Image: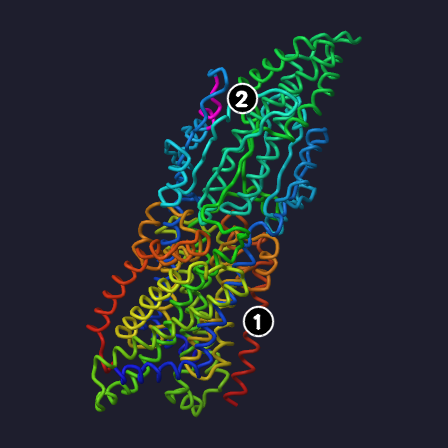
């Protein structure tokens, strides 16, 4: 066993001296986590919405006022061309076109049409549409309520002078603020409760990005570990080691242990940064977290060993690592939540241990998962690691 | 010129025999585009699967037993029109609904409380308040958001009815018909609900932005967006694979031996530069054709496709040569290059697409040549011509020119 540890220590020492390894194992994952977390923080920045008011009536003005009061939107009233351009350039999440005749339609109680200009698939535009729909809904609800009240009770007991239309107009003027007041203080509301959320926990974009980038870059760090093994094979270093008392199983184990320790240390750094710098509560259940870290390093080290055993050149290692890390990250939900993907994709993704590990990490952070809840992830990781290790040992060669 | 072409052809042939390089250049972007397209339904637009919702209706109706508003809310959630977005299961009580979320059997639980109807139909100056609980898995925000929105709309219907009642009551009272105000209020609420409330009156249609020239555009399919991002990203690697042969030949001694021939160094390096550009242009052409044949992607008009392809090839070549001019070994080239390309792809939006661009991120994308290219591809796929993507071609070409000049200066110093 001593030789195993010696070989592992040698590899770790080489990695520590390699500045490129530092770049990929620490610097880049922190940079990517920060970037994605800040970009998709969700809720901290109001979404820019360009509004084109093609109607000068009161309901159209009121709609714009209500949108401007929204805590979700940052509204700019502008001309049509400028609005289209702002969406095209990405300066606005969307542009809302209020057509001519909008106010007349609202006043007449007829269905109203609004057009939202946005890029297909934009999640920001989806949020804008939801908010616009809610605000427009309140506007229309208030107007409909006032018109209904006038239709039912507008002439009840009224003795004012002037014709029917004048009476109706006066009644509408009276009914609108009454309806608006009632809508502003609803009897029934929606109460949102987040399952497992710790008291005082504020959700932020890093909760999604940090575990995802952790998995993505653990995969990527295989590049440095695997490349070193390929170089040693090509330079006949491995063959020379066999002339010493080192046995083949000790050599393989030493390589695997080295990769395990490297990826485990990388996780400690990234999780520490997440906990201290990005307020991601990884330590909510330390025992569960430790199990997930072990699972991650087992999968990463056995996969790295297999890649290094099978591939014969650094170029092939770069290609395999880039493709694998991107594919596995996408399938596991590291880049986007799997809930936006189809059921087939989610099923395929959950054939991989990394999807289970990511679910476990996010569960620990936001839902307070304990050891019992992460055991399935550990089981899947162990099964995969055993299979990958067996393949790596079978394919391991001392020379190219 | 013929020597430059000869060197370029030699490098191109060498690349065609390099299996890892071909995998990176061709197979990887197509496979990733297929994978991500599969993730989002494989169709022309992004689509998400239905959110599993457990609904517990604890409402027993109003005091008279006639109305059950809770049943109406549950009915809205389970309506056929929402079957694509919500998969509803009714459960017996609130604890069972919440447990479904905790156990992972549902993403959201909706608990309609006992006394819901009674509160909704209550009268008086200070009516009782009630709340529908939406208990959601915080790691599944989208489903939770959709459910909140649907429940909110349903409650707005009741709110509108109460608003109609309040307004009718106020009108009747103001007009001296206080005796019948209560009855009129009830009639107003009934009429409001019967007429469909606010929900029947709003239609929001979505369309893509018009091109800078003002022409109407077509929607861009999701696979096209993804493959454009992957193509530009892997063009960096494609160029890097070819450019790295400069280092390989330098270490093997082939390059120094070439320098001893009557061929000028500029000719030799010019041949290398040309081979990088030609190879990565061919890579792009293959990917564009494959995208068209396999995924049915409409890349747009030929003039914009050609311009963006050549601009992208120039950027990829220039950047790859700059990276090679800075590093010393092929190992460094692979690792540093991969790091540079990943950062550029991240900032430029190759992984997120132009759909996610707005605000600060959109500004950051403009700091990268690939960000401009991706916006150009988006405009091209929406039907834009060369006039609509002028900046998206010129700015990357400017980046490419800077990369080439810096690389040339570095190589001149190294091989002086």
Instruction: Give neighbour class at mark 1: few <14, some 14-19, many 20+ (Cα, 10 Å).
Output: some
Do we see residue B221 in this rendering? Answer: no
Q: Which of marks 1 and 2 is nearer the N terminus?
A: 2
At numbered mark 2, what does the secondary structure look like: helix, strand or loop?
A: loop
Determine whether A51 is above or below A206 in the image.
above
Q: Are marks 1 and 2 in contact (CB under 8 Å)?
A: no
Residue B337 horizontal side relative to residue B396, left or right: left
At horizontal 36% and vertical 45% (from top left) the residue drawn is B103
Q: To which quarter of the image does residue B243 belong?
A: bottom left
Residue identified by numbered label 1: B401
At numbered mark 1, what does the secondary structure look like: helix, strand or loop?
A: helix
Please tell me which residue lies in front, B343 or A284. Answer: A284
Please tell me which residue lies in front, B83 or B273. Answer: B83
Span colored in magenta: B67-73
Color style of the picture: rainbow
Determine whether B385 is above or below A33 in the image.
above
Q: Residue A218 carries which label?
A: none
CA distance for labels 1 and 2: 62 Å
Q: Provide the chain ID for the residue under circle 1.
A: B
Residue identified by numbered label 2: B196
Please tell me which residue lies in front, A26 or B74. Answer: B74
Say if the magenta span includes residue A396: no
Do we see residue B104 in this rendering? Answer: yes
- Disc 1 with disc 2 on a shared chain: yes
Percent x, y of residue B312: 50, 64
Say if the magenta span includes residue B69: yes
Q: Main secondary structure of the magenta part?
A: helix
Query: Which residue extends farthest right?
Result: A161
At horizontal 58% and vertical 27% (from top left) the residue drawn is B128
């Amino acid at each position: 066993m001593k030789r195993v540890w010696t070989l592992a220590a040698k590899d770790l020492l080489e990695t520590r001296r390699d500045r490129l390894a530092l770049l990929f194992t620490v610097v880049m994952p922190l940079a990517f986590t920060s970037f994605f977390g800040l970009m998709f923080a969700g809720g901290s920045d109001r979404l820019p919405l360009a509004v084109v008011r093609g109607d000068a009536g009161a309901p159209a003005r009121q709609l714009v006022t209500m949108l401007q009061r929204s805590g979700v939107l940052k509204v700019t009233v502008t001309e049509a061309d400028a609005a289209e351009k702002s969406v095209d350039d990405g300066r606005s999440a969307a542009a809302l076109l209020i057509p001519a005749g909008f106010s007349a339609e609202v006043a007449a109680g007829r269905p109203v049409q609004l057009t939202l200009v946005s890029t297909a698939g934009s999640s920001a535009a989806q949020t804008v549409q939801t908010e616009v729909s809610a605000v427009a809904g309140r506007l229309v609800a208030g107007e409909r309520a006032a018109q209904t009240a006038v239709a039912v009770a507008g002439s009840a007991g009224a003795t004012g002078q002037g014709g029917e239309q004048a009476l109706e107009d006066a009644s509408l003027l009276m009914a609108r603020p009454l309806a608006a007041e009632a809508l502003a203080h609803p009897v029934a509301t929606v109460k949102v409760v987040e399952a497992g959320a710790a008291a005082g926990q504020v959700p932020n974009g890093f909760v999604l990005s940090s575990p995802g980038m952790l998995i993505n870059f653990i995969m990527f760090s295989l590049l440095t570990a695997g490349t070193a093994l390929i170089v040693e094979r090509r330079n006949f270093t491995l063959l020379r080691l066999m002339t010493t008392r080192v046995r083949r199983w000790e050599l393989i184990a030493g390589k695997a242990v080295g990769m395990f320790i490297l990826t485990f240390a990388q996780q400690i750094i990234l999780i520490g940064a997440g906990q201290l710098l990005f307020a991601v509560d990884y330590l909510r259940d330390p025992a569960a977290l430790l199990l997930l870290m072990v699972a991650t390093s087992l999968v990463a080290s056995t996969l790295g060993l297999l890649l290094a055993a099978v591939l014969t050149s650094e170029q092939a290692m770069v290609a395999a690592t880039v493709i694998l890390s991107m594919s596995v990250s996408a399938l596991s939900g590291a880049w986007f939540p799997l809930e936006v993907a189809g059921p087939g994709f989610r099923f395929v993704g959950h054939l991989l241990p990394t999807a289970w590990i990511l679910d476990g990490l996010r569960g620990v952070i936001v839902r307070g998962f304990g050891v019992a809840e992460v055991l399935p992830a550990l089981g899947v990781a162990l099964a995969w690691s055993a299979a990958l290790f067996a393949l790596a040992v079978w394919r391991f060669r001392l020379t190219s | 010129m013929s020597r430059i072409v000869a060197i370029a052809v030699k490098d191109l042939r060498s690349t065609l025999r390099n299996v890892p390089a071909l995998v990176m250049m061709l197979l990887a972007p197509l496979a990733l585009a297929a994978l991500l397209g599969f993730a989002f339904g494989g169709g022309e637009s992004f689509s998400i699967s239905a959110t599993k919702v457990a609904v517990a209706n604890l409402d027993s109706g109003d005091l008279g037993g006639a109305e059950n508003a809770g049943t109406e809310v549950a009915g809205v959630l389970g309506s056929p029109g929402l079957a694509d977005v919500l998969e509803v299961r009714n459960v017996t009580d609130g604890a069972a609904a919440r447990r479904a979320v905790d156990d992972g059997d549902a993403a959201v639980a909706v608990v309609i409380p006992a006394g819901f109807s009674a509160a909704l139909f209550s009268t008086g100056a200070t009516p009782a308040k009630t709340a529908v609980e939406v208990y959601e898995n915080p790691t599944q925000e989208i489903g939770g958001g959709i459910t909140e929105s649907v429940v909110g709309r349903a409650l707005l219907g009741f709110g509108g009815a109460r608003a109609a009642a309040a307004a009718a009551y106020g009108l009747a009272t103001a007009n001296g018909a206080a005796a019948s105000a209560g009855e009129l209020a009830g009639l107003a609420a009934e009429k409001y609900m019967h007429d469909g409330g606010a929900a029947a009156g709003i239609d929001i249609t979505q369309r893509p932005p018009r091109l800078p020239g003002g022409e109407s555009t077509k929607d861009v399919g999701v696979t096209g967006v993804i493959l454009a991002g992957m193509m530009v990203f892997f063009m960096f690697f494609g160029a890097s694979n070819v450019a790295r042969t400069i280092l390989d030949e330098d270490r093997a001694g082939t390059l120094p031996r070439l320098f001893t021939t009557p061929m000028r160094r500029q000719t030799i390096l010019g041949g290398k530069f040309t081979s990088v550009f030609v190879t990565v242009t061919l890579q792009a052409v293959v990917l564009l054709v494959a995208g068209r044949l396999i995924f049915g992607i409409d890349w747009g008009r030929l003039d914009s496709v050609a311009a963006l392809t050549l601009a992208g090839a120039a950027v990829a070549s220039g950047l790859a040569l700059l990276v090679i001019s800075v590093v010393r070994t092929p190992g460094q080239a692979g690792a540093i290059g991969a790091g540079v390309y990943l950062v550029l792809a991240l900032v430029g939006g190759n992984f997120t697409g132009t759909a996610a661009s707005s605000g600060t991120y959109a500004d950051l994308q403009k700091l990268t040549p690939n960000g401009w290219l991706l916006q150009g591809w988006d405009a091209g796929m929406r039907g834009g011509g060369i006039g609509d993507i002028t900046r998206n071609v010129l700015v990357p070409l400017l980046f490419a020119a800077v990369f080439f000049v810096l690389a040339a200066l570095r190589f001149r110093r190294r091989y002086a």
